[in-house]
Amino acid sequence: MKRPELKAPWAHARWAQGAIAVAALADVYRAVELRADATHRTDASPTASGTASMVFVYATTAAAVLFLLWLGRCRRNAEVLAPGTVRASGVWTVLAWFIPVVNWWVPRRFVLDVERASADASRRPRKEALVNAWWAVWVAHSAVSVVAFSVGKGVAVPALVVAEGLSLGAAVLVIGVVQHLTGLQDRQP
């Protein structure tokens, strides 16, 4: 049986990468505005942090949707490349990101499954370390952000700097993951 023709999801990848970069920058801008509003609060006018927060929400939503579209396409390609190696269905690949606690480890496994299937089919080296580094930085960012906004009310400078540094690091790493996986699927025999 002939394998169906695969097309690497480069358009999806580029849109996701761009949206991730915008969302990361919007996150930094939002954090700076929250800090500025907390130190120079005037109750008479609308806050700049409100606008910055809306920009962040829109940018993050776009990044999440585009990333999940890209991941879904890569998952379908991986299933064609190496049938039975991707553990999750297309629906579960998306839903796992939205289930609290589960989303801290299960989606990573799915991304590694896609990476494994794509690397094996292309006979290229795997880069699990890239996926694991992205995941570790993303989880650390999530944990530090929760602490910074719960305990420090979002204005504690050290926690804010660490959270935003981790956010930017996670964005750079996930852009690399998107590039790596899409490249693997583009190099099929």
Image (cartoon, rainbow, N blue to C red):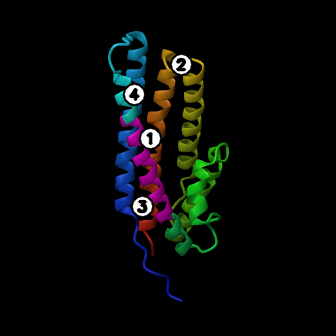
Q: Secondary structure at mark 2?
A: loop
- Which callout, 3 or 4, points at the residue further toward the start of the chain? 4
Q: Residue at x 41, y 32 (%)?
A: 27
Mark 4 residue type:
Arg
Q: Secondary structure at mark 1?
A: helix
Task: Residue 33: give its label.
Answer: none
Mark 3 residue type:
Gly
Find the residue positioned furthest to the right: 101
Numbered label tally: 4
Marks 3 and 4, Cα distance to the nearest angstrom?
Answer: 33 Å
- Which callout, 2 or 3, points at the residue further toward the start of the chain? 2
Residue 65 located within the stretch drawn in magenta? yes
Q: Residue 116: x, y in percent?
A: 58, 62
Q: Is residue 162 above or below residue 115?
A: above
Q: Nearer the viewer, mark 1 or mark 4?
A: 4
- Which callout, 1 or 2, points at the residue further toward the start of the chain? 2
Magenta stretch, residue numbers: 55-74
Circle 1 sits on which residue? 171
Mark 2 residue type:
Lys
Circle 3 sits on which residue? 183
Marks 1 and 4, Cα distance to the nearest angstrom?
Answer: 16 Å
Q: Residue at x 57, y 43 (%)?
A: 135
Task: Residue 153: give its label.
Answer: 2
Q: Residues within 10 Å of mark 2 (few under 14, many from 20)?
A: few
Q: Nearer the viewer, mark 2 or mark 3?
A: 2
Query: In this orientation, which residue lies closer to the viewer: 152 or 10?
Result: 152
Residue 7 located within the stretch drawn in magenta? no
Q: Nearer the viewer, mark 3 or mark 1?
A: 1
Quadrant of image for the C terminus:
bottom left
Circle 4 sits on which residue? 30
Q: Nearer the viewer, mark 1 or mark 2?
A: 2
Q: Secondary structure at mark 4?
A: helix
